Image (cartoon, grey):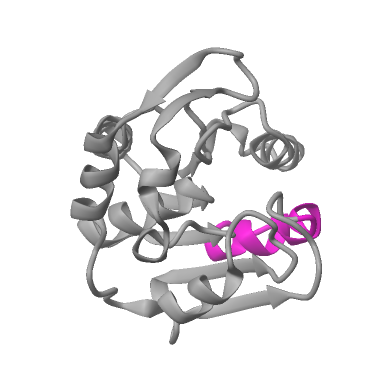
Amino acid sequence: MILYLHGFRSGPASSKPQQLLARMTELGINADLVYPQLRTSPRAAIAQAKDIIATSSRPVTLIGSSQGGFFATCLAEMHGLRAVLVNPAVIGCLKLTDFIGTHTHLYTGETFEFTLQDAEDSRQMNPPLLTKLDRYWLLAETGDEVLDYRHAVERYAGARQSVFEGGDHSFTRWPALLDDILKFAGYRF
């Protein structure tokens, strides 16, 4: 099973999970993809993902984009799972207080609050050290205008890394890597 975790203001209607769904549908494995609208509180989002993992009868591979990459890292460390991290947020390098306030989901139009408690919770959940680096695959583009890709390269040093020149925070090379991502998750076709 693949559990896709979206970014801060994103959701299941964004292009990456939709393109992944389309490719998995072509391969007849779309029932193996779970891509929920994550709760806005980081603690609640992690709890939501943990519930999904707990109910899976199959091995789970995490795919996380931006903030979802942070969540995927937390969950990979908690549960010993494989994780593909797409332009992931490196919490230790972010000034989380800059995000405190009201935000709008890009796909639902709903508003939500990111609070000082959410910032503190994120810092507390952040795994200080990563173990078993062979379970991680970092996908980053140097042109990411939201997050400094170098922080991710440093954070995931020793893990498999694919760092591409140019691009942006959306990770423009996503469609070309879908089959490789599915193979990393254990699918054979």
In this rendering, position of residue 145 left or right of residue 44: right
- Closer-to-camera residue (18/91): 91
In this rendering, position of residue 12 left or right of residue 37: right
> What is the number of callouts on the image?
0
Q: Residue at x 50, y 15 (%)?
A: 111
Indicate the quadrant where residue 164 lies: bottom right
Q: Which stretch appears magenta?
A: 172-189
Q: Residue at x 58, y 67 (%)?
A: 148
Q: Is residue 142 above or below residue 10?
A: below
Q: Is residue 155 above or below residue 75?
A: below
Residue, far bottom: 158
- Return the x and y of residue 46 as percentages of the image width and height: 29, 39
- Return the x and y of residue 149 as percentages of the image width and height: 59, 70
Let me know if residue 188 is in the magenta part.
yes
- Return the x and y of residue 188 as percentages of the image width and height: 62, 60
Quadrant of the drawing holding the C terminus: bottom right
Magenta-drawn stretch, dominant element (helix, strand or loop): helix
Q: Is residue 69 above or below residue 116?
A: below
Q: Residue at x 65, y 76 (%)?
A: 162
Indicate the quadrant where residue 90 lies: bottom left
Let me know if residue 41 is in the magenta part.
no
Quadrant of the drawing holding the N terminus: top left
- Return the x and y of residue 147 as percentages of the image width and height: 58, 59
Kindly tell me whether residue 186 is visible in this rendering. no
Kindly tell me whether residue 31 is visible in this rendering. yes
Q: Residue at x 40, y 71 (%)?
A: 135
